Amino acid sequence: MKTKYHLEVYEPEDIRTVAFSVESETPFGAIAVGDLLWHGSLLQSARLEVTKIEHLFWEGGGLNTHKICIQTKATKL
């Protein structure tokens, strides 16, 4: 069965607002608490530090889905 992958990164200290998300047909590389994230859509004056990671899995529509939800805090450059 085919698998779809989602990565969802939330705004700093806000678990309701998505800063950015990405979908892929291949798995994402490992991400750990304490890692620093940078994305072109974010302000140039800050980067995001990973504070919590949740993995969600479900089946439906003939495929498996793996969604990684990343909570963050702002870290100055």
Image (tube, rainbow, N blue to C red):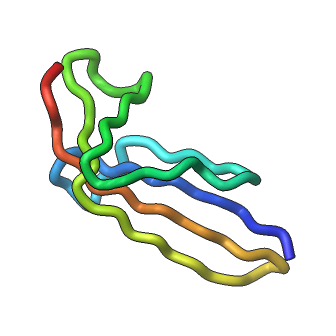
The quarter of the rendered structure image containing the N terminus is bottom right
For this view, does 51 lie left or right of residue 32?
Answer: left
With respect to residue 34, does 62 lie above or below?
below
Residue positioned 84% across, 79% down in the render: 62
Q: Is residue 30 left or right of residue 37?
A: right
Q: How many labels, in total?
A: 0
Q: Quadrant of the C terminus?
A: top left
| Quadrant position of residue 54 | bottom left
Image position, residue 30 (x, y; %): 50, 52
Residue 25 percent location from the top left of the image: 75, 53
Coordinates of residue 12 in the picture (x, y in percent):
20, 45
User: In the current view of this chain or complex, which residue is farthest to the bottom?
Assistant: 59
- Splitting the image into 4 quarters, where does residue 20 fall? top left
Q: Which residue is depicted at the point 30% across and 52% down? A: 17
Taking the spot 76% from the left edge, 67% from the top edge, the residue there is 3
Position of residue 76 relative to residue 18, above or below, is above
Direction from residue 70 to residue 11 in the image, left or right:
left
Q: Position of residue 74 (x, y in %)?
A: 16, 37
Quadrant of residue 44 within the rendered picture:
top left
